[in-house]
Amino acid sequence: MYIKNNISLKPYNTFGIDVLAKHFVEVDNLDELRAVLALKTYPNKLILGGGSNMLLTKNQDALVIHVNIKGIFIISEDENTVTVKANAGENWHEFVLWCLQHDFGGVENLSLIPGNVGTAPIQNIGAYGVELKDTFVACEGLSVETNEIKSFSKSDCDFGYRNSIFKQHAKGKYVITNVTFKLSKKAHKLNIIYGSIKTQLEAMGITNPTIKEVSKAVIAIRESKLPNPKEIGNSGSFFKNPVISKAEYNALIENFPEIPSYTVSENEIKIPAGWLIEKAGFKGKRFGDYGVHKKQALVLVNYGNAKGLDILNLSKLIQNTITRLFGISIEAEVNIL
């Protein structure tokens, strides 16, 4: 464990924003993490995982702690299910691939989502009709204040759409160190009706898919729509899909009868934010070194040397335009730092 000074965070965030960390340290195990959190000489600390759900808008006057704790373990299993624990520093997609290699089902729809396992519960990552909470059993977090480990059950986490206790009143209070999942070993329950998975599988000539084939379909869809952060800086979906009341929806379709929607509950309708942004004319728009991706309007991109403030200001312009045109507020999904 070695603390460095004035380190560029460009390699540590998927947006590829070049800001400096006043102090930087990488921790590879729980003991190192405990020791760093206990350091009184660095009162300001920032936890960094895969760097996939953040937009850095300024130099960080803090000790940036990069959590790199690795390891995947089978905790228990029976004839039908297996309980697996993954440490926080594991890359999320590599964890999904590990599950598929062992024929463990439940996370295949979450293939190719950027980031690490430790940050996945914070925003309850989800894609194509599946969310992290569907296979989540528990996670452990190290208290920043007491340096003690606390276990969080699914109910403790208060999961919602791209939301959890870790984005609310427990925000910044714990560093998630591992996550435990319950996965299927056979008779996998496939979810292929959401989005274009079924169409993609048909295009691949697959009528009775395995979990590996569902994953391949998801990867093909994501690669066709979403830019690779290694090629174009981005954080995936920048905005949440807004959920509006049925009354608001009924008023909206009078002016926009073609608007797509998904029923959330008896009185709630989800509207694709990407559709709203595209309808507002932002899809594919470029402003110098930053802009909106040409294939997916939900994705804001850094074409090379954009500043975080540039992208933040673009996001605000999009939000204000959507409110003006549709009377709908869209929230940023990423953390602004």
Image (cartoon, helix red, strand yellow):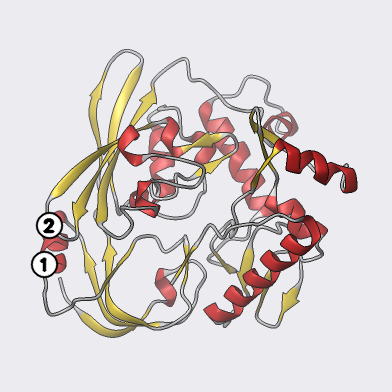
Residue pictured at 58% horizontal, 27% vertical: 191
- Quadrant in which the C terminus is drawn: bottom left
Residue pictured at 15% horizontal, 68% vertical: 36
Given residues 122 and 25, the one toward you in this image is 122
Residue 151 screen position, x and y as percent: 21, 40
- The quarter holding residue 305 reads bottom right
Residue 15 visible? The answer is: yes
Identify the residue position indicated by label 1 in the image. 38
Q: CA distance from mark 1 to mark 2?
A: 7 Å
* Disc 2, SS: loop
Verify CB contact (< 8 Å) between mark 1 and mark 2.
yes
Given residues 30 and 259, the one toward you in this image is 259
- The quarter holding residue 8 reads bottom left
Residue 283 visible? The answer is: no
- Residue at the front extreme, as displayed: 247
Residue 86 screen position, x and y as percent: 29, 42
Residue 214 screen position, x and y as percent: 58, 32
Q: Is residue 193 above or below residue 172?
A: above
Residue pictured at 34% horizontal, 40% vertical: 157
Q: For the residue carrying disc 2, how many other residues have a C-alpha within 10 Å: few (<14), some (14-19), or many (20+)?
A: some
Q: Say which amino acid is labelled 2.
A: Asn
Q: For the residue carrying disc 1, how many other residues have a C-alpha within 10 Å: few (<14), some (14-19), or many (20+)?
A: some
- Residue at the bottom extreme, as displayed: 6
The image's mark for residue 284 is none
Label count reads 2
Residue pictured at 42% horizontal, 73% vertical: 11
Identify the residue position indicated by label 2 in the image. 147
Q: Say which amino acid is labelled 1.
A: Ala
